[in-house]
Amino acid sequence: MQKFDFSILTRDGQKVESIVIAGKDEAEAERKLRQMYRYCEIVSCNSKQADSSVGGQQSMSVEDILSLISK
């Protein structure tokens, strides 16, 4: 799944930068964006590749999470 980085102008004229939304394509990400920001104007959209190996993210079990909380 790709991530898309949007910069928008709200209907009130405020600029909002770097809204990252995941989607299978740009059209789906834009649809999700427009659900949150109705009547916004999209200033820019940049595609980012979602790579799970970057950052070393690993899935954790419930027991691992509880042991971290209890420490």
Image (tube, helix red, strand yellow):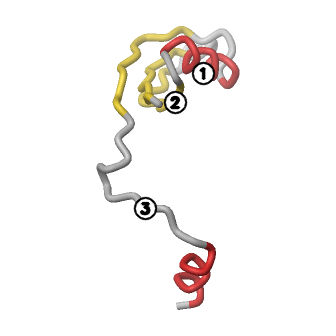
Badge 3 or badge 1: first in the primary sequence:
1
The residue under the point 53% across, 25% down is 23
**Image vertical order of residue 39 relative to residue 51, above or below:** above
Q: Using a 10 Å C-alpha cutoff, classify the residue at mark 3 as few (fewer than 14 neighbours), some (14 to 19) or many (20 or more).
A: few
Q: Secondary structure at mark 2?
A: strand
**Disc number lying in front (3 or 1):** 3
Kindly identify which residue carries mark 3: 58
Residue 40 x, y percent position in the rendering: 60, 12
Tell me the residue at 35%/28% (across/down): 48
The Cα atoms of the two marked residues, 3 and 1, are separated by: 28 Å
Q: Residues within 10 Å of mark 1 (few under 14, many from 20)?
A: some
Residues under numbered marks 1 and 2 in contact, where contact means CB atoms less than 8 Å apart: yes
Query: Circle 2 is placed at which residue position?
Result: 21
Give the mark, 3 or 2, whose residue is nearer the N terminus: 2
Disc on the earlier residue, 1 or 2: 2
Q: CA distance from mark 1 to mark 2?
A: 7 Å
Q: Residue at x 43, y 11 (%)?
A: 43
Amino acid type for the residue under numbered disc 3 = Gln
Gap in Å between the C-alphas at discs 3 and 2?
A: 21 Å
* Tag 1 secondary structure: helix
Q: Looking at the image, is 64 positioned above or below residue 7?
A: below
**Closer to us: 46 or 22:** 22
Which residue is nearer to you in this view: 10 or 28?
28
Residue 33 in picture, x, y percent from top left: 60, 21
The residue at which mark 1 appears reads as: 33
The amino acid type found where label 1 is placed reads: Leu
Q: Is residue 46 left or right of residue 12?
A: left
Callout 3–callout 1 Cβ contact below 8 Å: no
